[in-house]
Image: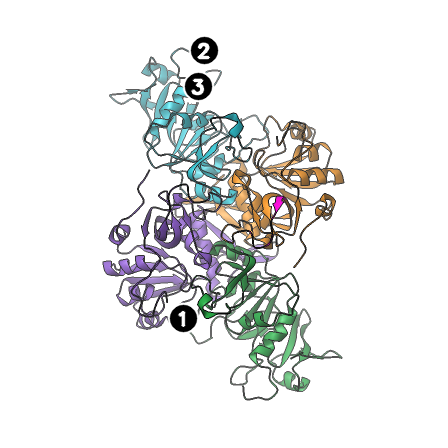
Chain colours: A green, B cyan, C orange, D purple
Amino acid sequence: MSEPNRLSRDQIAARVALELQDGWLVNLGIGMPTLTVNYIPEGRDILFHSENGIIGMGPRPARDEDIDPDLMSAGKGPVTLIPGGAFIHHADSFAVARGGRLDAAVLGAFQVAVNGDLANWRLPNAISGSVGGAMDIAAGAKRVFAMMTHTAKGGEPKIVEALTYPLTAKTCVSKIFTDMAVVAVTPDGYVLEEVAPGVTVDEVVAATGAALTIPDTVGTIAA
Amino acid sequence: MSEPNRLSRDQIAARVALELQDGWLVNLGIGMPTLTVNYIPEGRDILFHSENGIIGMGPRPARDEDIDPDLMSAGKGPVTLIPGGAFIHHADSFAVARGGRLDAAVLGAFQVAVNGDLANWRLPNAISGSVGGAMDIAAGAKRVFAMMTHTAKGGEPKIVEALTYPLTAKTCVSKIFTDMAVVAVTPDGYVLEEVAPGVTVDEVVAATGAALTIPDTVGTIAA
Amino acid sequence: MKNKKADTLEDAIARLNDGATMLIGGFGIAGVPEILIEGVCDRGLRDLTIVANNSGTHKTGIARLLAEGCVGKIICSFPWAVESFVFKELYEDGKVDLEVVPQGTLAERMRAAGAGLGGFLTPTAVGTDLGAGKAVHEIDGKEYILEMPLKGDFALIKAREVDARGNLTFRMAARNFNPVMATAADYTIVEATTEVPVGDLDPECIITPGVFVDCYYIAGPYVPGKEEGPRS
Amino acid sequence: MKNKKADTLEDAIARLNDGATMLIGGFGIAGVPEILIEGVCDRGLRDLTIVANNSGTHKTGIARLLAEGCVGKIICSFPWAVESFVFKELYEDGKVDLEVVPQGTLAERMRAAGAGLGGFLTPTAVGTDLGAGKAVHEIDGKEYILEMPLKGDFALIKAREVDARGNLTFRMAARNFNPVMATAADYTIVEATTEVPVGDLDPECIITPGVFVDCYYIAGPYVPGKEEGPRS
């Protein structure tokens, strides 16, 4: 990212972590969302679900020699199990996800549409994609938080009116966390909630591919 | 049973038990079928499934003080668990039954039709019935053995051309074991395989409500 | 950590309301949350829909709920046991509705609700009175009917061990419907025999993960107040 | 008791045949029946349909099956990992077919096969490329698509402990697809780490009852012959 004043991946993760409430069960998508686990505010009990059958996924083992090949996240990174965690099989694990037990899923995104449609599994010109659990989790979670850069590498907006990328799940995204802003997806359209320190509202508007409601007060992302 | 030469319930059970092959997984319906467990020929390893979540159900405890209220059959009688048995929940238990893992189910019957239709859950004049697991098990088992008296209390045949009683499951019964005979249900209709000691073929024909193919040799039930 | 423990029976069942659909675990005398049911009786709720394997037996448990006029409808597989005389009388008087569901379909409908499915195709009950009016699909020459999920506002279940996260184990055939019902309700209340510290349960042997449990009450091993003697 | 134990790897996989649909357990490096797959490679079978979470990674396991020309089609959720270069090349050359299935739908389709269901309605993939052409049902204002069961001729799975009845336990996240696949195949072959006497496994903690297991082979804890080092 050559633009100034953009949040780092870890700073976005820190902001997403603030959004996760005490007692929630949360699934973190592979890639950037995984970083969220490192920024959970102290005192908050967040339980992490990994679709490969872990409830109560804990952080990477402190010592490499404690890495267990049978205890990996969905993103294939080494993890631990917290006390009181449990192992379940794949069908049960997706029953948890599809059945609405996930209070939130944090997912990477290529595009989000104003009705909450999410695109994150396949590029438009690709013959196919690696869907993994994205469609099940996006369709099933109570809240989907999209976590992404505000614009694509070429500068095209990823927050758009309607998807041009292949759909992952309809009307599922409730909030978007980017390197520039926090944008809520509401029945009345996108609402700008926060901007990154040093980023102006105008810059966010310019980088967004759809109408953005600007409330009287726009917060600054704590980063 | 005032008729002479009719098999007792235990004698029918002993004949049914002979039919169960080594290595089979078997569900015994509540009532008379339950008796079958007492007559398994020595050396045959039959695994019993009880729809309330027991795989490897064993006989009633030898001593009453070993009866455990948490270890009952589907018929609510005290049972045991054999070594290597397992407990599963109700949805998994019926996945076993519906999924075709039962090599046989032994079920009581009000009527059997020549196409294998089974009626065993509700009387025609009743407002409703207690279906329990009968429909699932009858629809799912690889073989359904009907175990019943040959005729109803008033003498009406229970082996009939077409059901007049409410259906439990279509075309599922492969063999019928009664107090008078063993009758196979085949694509060519009913075939009389064996008669009870002292019962004549003519008596069986008279007590049966549909055409019965009589092979050149009809066996005698070992009882 | 979310506090899921109810210190009193009253607290455990405080959320229940008139008109609610309640999934109640148990098969025969095994795995029935008897203490919770007694508590519900004492609350004098009305118009409950009860989902269970049977329609209550003798005079306690679901039978007592019926006798005290709390129940508007029962959804079960086995309503007509001889011991279900309380239900039978109310049904004949037109005071309670009944939906009979094959036992496997009953379990699977709740599993579907818990798994976020919109329904499933089953061969069970095809062509029968209990399949009447349901859409028939023929797949590879075999007929199936479409069954719908069955969701509870509340599940009342019985477990053996519980920890503060709500993780559960069960005991032998007392497992039965309990784990499935835990997944299928908006709010799941557990009557547990004993509480263990978090981390004591083997993560390989937890049958119901705590994410399905909203509230638990420790009832202990002793089940008091039964007219027909212990546990019957 | 039925003898389910195969003394040699050759015996364990002797029944496999050209053209078979094989469900293969594992997620990432966890719970993959690597020894069984190596054995299948050595048999030189053709036209296999492989159902697994991914399309094989690096040069071993499913990737070796692909490289040796054994595979006609892969059904999986995650075909395009960087490490799946063997698959990618074959796919681009038109030498292998691909069906991409959402991971939860993949698991549920196998569960449906194992449970004797004719299909199920899921909200997953509604309106997407992966839902295209599938019947849409609207229930209570929510859309679902009808998905069909996915059955294997064979399942190749990895377990931790096995007893002579075929009862299984798994290890941590190596459980993944294995128990579901065990239910969904006509013939299930297990690669187990260790054998224990019948009766040693806690009946409350058996994850796959032996009724789903047709054959097991004890591979021991050590997994040899990997180019990328142990287990990767």
Q: Is residue B150 visible?
A: no
Amino acid marked by disc 3: Thr
Q: Earlier in the sequence, mark 3 or mark 2?
A: 2
Amino acid marked by disc 2: Ser
Callout in the foreground (1, 2) = 1
Q: Position of residue C41 (x, y in %)?
A: 72, 37
In the rendered view, does A146 fall on the left or right side of B84?
A: right
As drawn, the label of residue B151 is 3
**Quarter of the N terminus of chain D within the rendering:** top left
As drawn, the label of residue D80 is 1
Chain identifier of the residue bearing label 1 in the image: D
Separation of residues labelled 3 and 2 (CA atoms) = 12 Å
Give the magenta-colored segment's residue range: C192-201
Q: Which residue is drawn at the image coordinates 33% and 12% (left, top)?
A: B198
Q: Which residue is drawn at the image coordinates 62% and 69% (left, top)?
A: A40
User: Dot 2: within a 10 Å radius of its alpha carbon, few (fewer than 14), some, or many (20 or more) residues?
Assistant: few
Helix, strand, or loop for circle 1?
A: loop
Chain identifier of the residue bearing label 2 in the image: B
